[in-house]
């Protein structure tokens, strides 16, 4: 064989390289239906929200009156509303921090409990968590609203029977502090199962040999948890924290239902309910759209931390 002739192996390898370089449109074709659906269901509402935020859009515009372009007037009105927007946003952030910390701590404790207990008790705990997780938010909030009802609530009946004082007529929701205490209990009660199951799945992947070696070296249970278990599930904790921040910041159902039962809206509004009241209740759709755009930017800023961390881990 001369030097100018190519061997069959060389020819096949070059053909394989050409096939790899040739762009494949099949994946994009398979994803096209999903991308179109997401564009219609998500992209259009976001674009419409952005357009309305630059317009004076009131109830008259719903009847066909042309909307007038007002530029950044809606954003200026929102960002200068200290007693309205900024107060509600600050309240929402404080509530989010309390909810995320409480959910993560309790979720981690339940996950550690599920690792240590036997199969029977673990099954019982899992069923209880699943029942709490499966209950719809509206139904759960309504039930807990009945528990704390002013006249016929279980809590007031128990306190009357235990203390001997008359608790009938005591409102737990009219006071903002007790309102948010009950709200925290309801939200955490429904959020802990997801966190606990996810952390339990991650903690079960920690090698038992490493834990036994650390125990033989004299490491305490807390040291094994802090130095071995937490680093193993750190990426999972990051994901859960970011997701919990997003979910708790856009809280709506639980707040709205408790306000209907007996809460003071002006003192207990969160950002989700504030957007709803500004738009649907008061008819200021342009202002509500501006608040919605600002809220989307805040959510993207929160998500950016998780995305950047994920990309860094993939590079490593």
Image: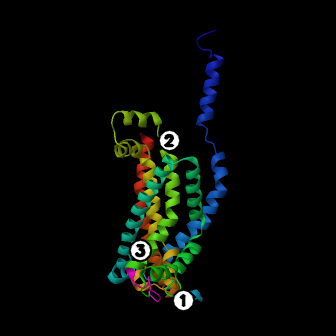
Q: Position of residue 104 (x, y in %)?
A: 43, 58
- Report the residue at 41% width, 63% height from top: 102
Label 3 Cα neighbours within 10 Å, binned few <14 / some 14-19 / many ≥20: some
Placement of 50 over or under 214, stated as above or below: below
Q: In which quarter of the image is the C terminus?
A: top left
Which residue range is magenta in the image?
A: 167-176
Q: Quadrant of the N terminus?
A: top right
Q: Residues under labels 1 and 2: Cα distance?
A: 56 Å
Secondary structure, mark 2, is loop
Total labels drawn: 3
Residue 304 in view: yes
Q: Nearer the viewer, mark 2 or mark 3?
A: 3
Q: Are marks 2 and 3 in contact (CB under 8 Å)?
A: no
Q: Is residue 36 covered in magenta?
A: no
- Report the residue at 39% width, 41% height from top: 228
Disc 2 target residue? 205
Q: Residues under labels 3 and 1: Cα distance?
A: 36 Å
Q: Where is residue 36 in the image (x, y as percent from the top left)?
A: 63, 61
Disc 3 target residue? 181
Viewer-proximal residue among 221 and 26: 221
Placement of 15 over or under 238, stated as above or below: above
Badge 1 or badge 2: first in the primary sequence: 1
Q: Do the residues labelled 1 and 2 touch (CB within 8 Å)?
A: no
Disc 1 target residue? 59
Secondary structure, mark 1, is helix
Q: Please, what is the dominant secondary structure of the magenta stretch?
A: loop
């Amino acid at each position: 064989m001369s030097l100018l002739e190519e061997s069959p192996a060389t020819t096949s390898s070059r053909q394989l390289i050409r096939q790899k370089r040739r762009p494949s449109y099949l994946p994009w074709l398979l994803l096209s239906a999903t991308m179109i659906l997401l564009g219609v269901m998500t992209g259009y509402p976001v674009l419409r929200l952005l357009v309305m935020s630059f317009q004076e859009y009131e109830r008259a515009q719903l009847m066909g009156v042309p909307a007038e372009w007002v530029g950044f007037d809606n954003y200026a009105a929102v960002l200068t509303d200290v007693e309205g927007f900024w107060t509600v946003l600050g309240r929402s952030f404080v509530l989010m921090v309390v909810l995320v910390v409480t959910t993560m701590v309790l979720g981690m404790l339940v996950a550690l409990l599920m690792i240590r207990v036997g199969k029977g008790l673990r099954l019982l705990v899992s069923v209880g968590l699943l029942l709490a997780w499966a209950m719809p938010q509206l139904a759960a909030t309504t039930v807990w609203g009945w528990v704390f009802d002013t006249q016929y609530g279980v809590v007031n009946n128990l306190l009357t029977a235990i203390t001997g004082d008359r608790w009938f007529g005591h409102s737990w929701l009219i006071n903002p502090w007790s309102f948010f205490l009950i709200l925290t209990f309801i939200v955490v009660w429904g959020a802990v199962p997801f966190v606990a199951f996810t952390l339990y799945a991650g903690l079960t992947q920690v090698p038992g040999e490493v834990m036994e070696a650390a125990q033989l070296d004299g490491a305490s249970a807390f040291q094994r948890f802090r130095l071995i278990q937490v680093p193993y599930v750190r990426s999972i904790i990051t994901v859960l924290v970011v997701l919990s921040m997003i979910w708790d910041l856009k809280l709506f159902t639980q707040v709205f239902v408790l306000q209907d039962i007996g809460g003071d809206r002006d003192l207990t509004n969160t950002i989700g309910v504030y957007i709803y009241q500004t738009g649907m209740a008061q008819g200021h759709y342009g202002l509500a759209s501006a608040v919605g755009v600002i809220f989307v930017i805040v959510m993207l800023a929160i998500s950016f931390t998780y995305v950047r961390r994920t990309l860094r881990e993939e590079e490593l």
